[in-house]
Image: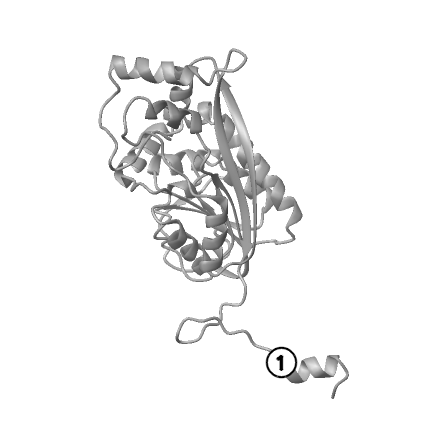
Amino acid sequence: MADAELDFAEVRRAFDHAAASYDAHAVLQREVCDRLLTRLDFMTLQPERVLDVGCGTGYGLAHLQRRYPEADMCALDIAPAMLHAAKARMPQSGLAQRVLSGVLGRGVHHHAVCADMDRLPLADNSMNLAWSSLALQWAHDLEATLKGLHRVLAPGGLLIFATFGPDTLKELRTAFAAVDDAPHVNRFIDLHDIGDMLIHAGFASPVMEMEILTLTYADLKTLMRDLKGIGAHNAAASRKRGLLGKSAWAQLEQAYEAHRLEGRLPATFEVIYGHAWVGDKKRREDGRQVIEFNIETRRRKLGLS
């Protein structure tokens, strides 16, 4: 996710704790998910098996189920409480609480996998569509995660995602810098670096887009309450433990006030959208991809033989 190592026990604990409050605070997350869903309108893919990476409480998962009613759905999240909430939201009951160790069987439509996205417990070539809305920023090693997604996607499969870019919460990061030098806001990977990682992971034809969304707040406490409500507070391994003292909080509020505009405090979110395809997976023993050309067929089509 970032240049600072994350404490994944804390990430899991935070999202488990936030499952009950998540939907009440996830205005931005739903908006981004809706915008990502519209991008599927331009894809002709009709997947048999769909993987939702970082499904949260299942808002996107339910929409994917309605869009692809004949597809097997696999919900993956690091937090058990989030998976439980996703199960309750699904339009059909029977979300199986088990880890998949092989190719999904036909006729079984819903599966839940509690796992780290960096270590997908799924079979090679077992999915046709991998979807992730605002979850990849929590990857410990994003390129390794993308390689894992390439592995589980079948040839012709699609990865489509939204994640956060470096300008996300830039006002909060600047305000905290006036308090101390400790990491308080997670850092995010640049659009161009993500595009390079997709290529290195084996994906073809990556398309990347970026937009800036801004939420405004009456005060800093409301912003911090929203972040805590979705489980997105600071999880850096080197973070300071405990709450800010009164003096530090007062410094933070004063520093953030410098950003107030037209009576409101802005919170910037840089949203990166991307999609890429899986091509032929034939490889040489040294790991290089094999591209086959049928010369005789090509010559006949050109009238050369």
- Residue located 49% across and 37% down the image: 90
| Depicted 241 relative to depicted 4: above or below | above
Residue 173 seen in this snapshot? yes
Query: Which residue is farthest left?
Result: 241
In the displayed structure, 240 sits above or below 104; it is: above
- Residue 20 visible? The answer is no
- Residue type pointed to by label 1: Asn
**Label 1 neighbour load within 10 Å: few <14, some 14-19, many 20+:** few
Place residue 55 in its image quadrant.
top left
Seen as rendered, the residue at the extreme bottom is: 305
Q: In percent of the image, x 26 and y 32: which residue is there?
A: 239
Q: Is residue 162 left or right of residue 35?
A: left
Quarter occupied by the N terminus: top left
Residue linked to disc 1 = 294
Q: Position of residue 277 (x, y in %)?
A: 55, 57
Q: Position of residue 291 (x, y in %)?
A: 54, 73
Point out the image quarter for the C terminus.
bottom right
